[in-house]
Amino acid sequence: MKIKMILTNAFSIDVRVYKEARYLVTRGNEVEILCWDKTPQKRLPQTENMEGINIRRFSISAIAGSGVKQLGAYLKFLRECKKYLHDKKYDVVHCHDLDGAIIGCFLKHKLIFDMHEFYDKGSFLKAKISHFATRAIAKKAIANIYVTPLSLEAYGHGIEKKFFQLKNYSDRNSFADIEKTQSSKLRVSYIGTVRNQLTEFHSLFEAVKDIDDIIVNIYGGGVDLAELEKMALLYNNVNVYGAFNGVSESEYIYKNTDVSYIAYSLTNPNYHGDFEPVKLYEAIATETPIVATKGLNIGRVALKYDIGKAVDTQNIKQIRQAFLDMLDKPELIRRYSDNMKKIAKQFDWNEAVKVLDQIYLDMK
C-alpha cells in the first residue's frame, strides 16, 4: 500500500511519527512523509531515506508554535503538498495532528487522522473552532488515531468504531545502551518542546541556582526557546541546547541525564485527563527517575509506580526539596530506576503499534 503522510514539522525531532512510519514500512507498505521544514537555515536535506521511510521536506520559514503568525507559511506548505501530489498515485493520506489533517482534507483522498493531542484548548472561541474542525475531520476520516480518551469523548460520539488508541509508549529497542555516563553532578534535564512552560522553568532554575551539585540541561526547540535562552543567562548551572534530533540523539541525551524534569501548567487543558507525554515513557525505558507536575496524570504515575517525585512545579521550595532529597539519599535514585525496570514491559510500543494493522488491513 502506498501511504503519504502529512507532517507540519521537519520530522527530525518527531519520534512518534518515525516509529509509526517505520512500523508501516516493516509491514510491507511504501511510506513517504511530506514535511514542513520551518528552519531552512539548518540545511536539512530536501529528500532522504531513513530505514525505508521516504522523506520530502519543503523549506518554508516560520516560527513553530506562533499560531496565526505562521498562517501565510502554512498555506504555502498546503499548496506545495497539493502540487507535489498532483500526479502521484497513492492509497491513503495519513495526517498528523489537526493542522496536518486540514491539509489532508484539501487533497480529496482517503484520510487517516492521527490526533497526537487534545485540541479543545486556548480561548473559548479558539477551543470552539478547534472542536468543530476536529469533529468534522474525524467524521470524514476513514480512521482516527488518538492518544488520550479525552479525544474519544470529545470527537468520537457516534463514530467510535473509527477511533483507535495508540499511546505515546517508547520503543525500548531505540535505546540499546541506557547505562548512565559518570558525572560528579546530578544532571537534571527537560527533554522536549518548550512551549507555555516559562513559569515552570523559572521555578526550576530558582530552586537549584545555588546548589553546586546540580546542573540543569534543557533540550528542545519551540516558541519559548528565545526567551528561555535569555533566562538561562542569569544562572551559572543552566544550559539550553535548543532543538535536537529525536531519532538519533535521544539515547545520548538520556545517557547523560540522571533525572527527567517533566513539568507543565495545570491551567493548560491539553495536559488534563490521562495525558502522558512521550518523555514519560522514554524516562521509563531508560530508567531515568522523574520529577513531575503534581495534579497532572504524570505526577500520579510517578507516585503510583514509585518512579519519582510529584511536586507543584511552580513552587520553588517544593522543587528544591525534591532535588535535595535525591542528593542526600542516592538510594532514592536507585529505587526509582529499579521500579522503572520492573514496569517497563507494561508500556510496550511494539505491542501497542499493532493497532495500525487493524486500520490498514481493513483497507486492503
Image: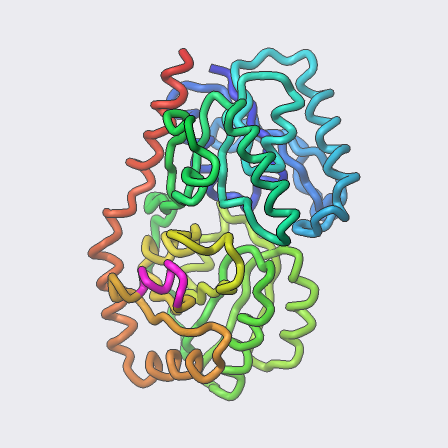
Q: Nearer the viewer, residue 296 or 107?
A: 296
Q: Residue furthest right?
A: 72
Residue appearing at x 62%, y 37% in the figure: 99
Along the horizontal axis of the image, is 39 left or right of 339? right
* Residue 173 in picture, x, y percent from top left: 34, 43
Q: Residue furthest left?
A: 342
Taking 185 as reference, is 90 above or below it? above
**Would residue 276 be seen by someone viewing this image from the given angle?**
no
Quadrant of the drawing holding the C terminus: top left
Q: Residue at x 63, y 74 (%)?
A: 232
Residue 161 visible in the picture: yes
Q: Give the image location of residue 94, x and y in percent.
A: 52, 26
The part of the image, by quadrant, that contains residue 342 is bottom left
In magenta stretch: residue 179: no
Q: Position of residue 153 (x, y in %)?
A: 41, 40
Instruction: Please tell me whether the stretch drawn in magenta is mainly helix, strand or loop.
Output: helix
Total tally of numbered discs in the picture: 0
Q: Residue at x 55, y 22 (%)?
A: 93
In-front residue for pair 206/117: 117
Q: In this picture, which residue range is highlighted in magenta?
A: 295-302
Q: Is residue 301 magenta?
A: yes
At x 79% / y 39%, what residue is drawn?
72
